[in-house]
Image: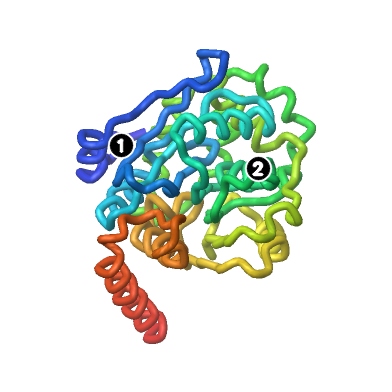
Amino acid sequence: MGEIKVSPDYNWFRSTVPLKKIIVDDDDSKVWSLYDAGPRSIRCPLIFLPPVSGTADVFFQQILALTGWGYRVIALQYPVYWDHLEFCDGFRKLLDHLQLDKVHLFGASLGGFLAQKFAEYTHKSPRVQSLILCNSFSDTSIFNQTWTANSFWLMPAFMLKKIVLGNFASGPLDPEMADGIDFMVDRLESLGQSELASRLTLNCQNSYVEPHKIRDIPVTIMDVFDQSALSTEAKEEMYKLYPNARRAHLKTGGNFPYLCRSAEVNLYIQIHLLQFHGTRYAAIDPSMVSAEELEVQKISLHTSNEQEEQ
């Protein structure tokens, strides 16, 4: 494979936003890695949860853009957890450590599934104010691998990487999508055997979301119309599960629209979060709201005009 093309924005991000490492479990090998950017006065930030192949920095374009608008955003990388309950318990402890009572969650693929499971886990004492689910799913059985979920821990890293790479798009791609895939392949290479095995286990372990426990949470479903690892049936199931959800459709973007279609993704995130402006659950510095709202409306108008012309 050729040299990975690294954008100047990514280099700027790595040089300006520090990566923090936090341990909240008794087992000190379980380390959460995270980027926490934007005004600390915000008590209900937007937290990004990555897919199987992702690290916290796959959301660097969201962090740079949204903090520029005055949002507080946190991007996470999970420790090694082998079941959903263990993940949810660890994530709750992390929010306690960060002194965050409620949060907005953006989850990509596995990250979206874990976001839903966490909302379900905390439904009696809610910790999730809203959900943005990007190329996500509500039932792990869609991958037809529940029977192998308990054997991932035995597989060598190269085999696990081959399983993940099998879901990446192939064939002709536009330059942004090709760069996005190269970037994700590079991130995948940085993950160790236990990290990958545990994530694949969480992705395929027999489990589904119980919608009655989270039906009152505002949801935006973000998906793409071109090739992705998610089947049409899985998308339809999400629409049925959340009939009142806002839908954010991208014509193209593949598995990683937050990398290769970041402007559109960032706009949909802003539109989702607008409903909380002026409340205690706002993820944005109140002094930035008027300028940010005007800009979002301007971009929305421009986007809708362009779509009408096509």
Q: Is residue 242 left or right of residue 158?
A: right
- Could you say where residue 125 lies in the image, as x and y percent from the top left? 65, 44
Q: How far is the residue under mark 2 from the one under mark 1? A: 40 Å
Above or below, 148 relative to 142: above
- Residue highlighted by disc 2: 122
- Could you say where residue 33 lies in the image, as x and y percent from the top left? 42, 28
Give the amino acid type for the residue marked by disc 2 in the picture. Answer: Thr
Question: Quadrant location of the C terminus?
Answer: bottom left
Q: Disc number at residue 271? A: none
**In the structure shown, which secondary structural element does the residue marked by tag 1 occupy?**
loop
Q: Nearer the viewer, residue 132 or 222?
A: 132
**In the structure shown, which secondary structural element does the residue marked by tag 2 occupy?**
loop
Q: Give me the residue at 66% from left, 25% from top.
A: 82
Camera-nearest label, 2 or 1: 2
Above or below, 48 relative to 269: above
- Could you say where residue 63 lies in the image, as x and y percent from the top left? 33, 47
Local crowd at mark 2 within 10 Å, few (<14), some, or many (≥20)?
A: some
Snapshot quadrant of residue 292: bottom left
Q: Is residue 163 left or right of residue 74?
A: right
Q: Is residue 13 visible?
A: yes
Q: Nearer the viewer, residue 215 or 268?
A: 215
- Residue highlighted by disc 1: 4
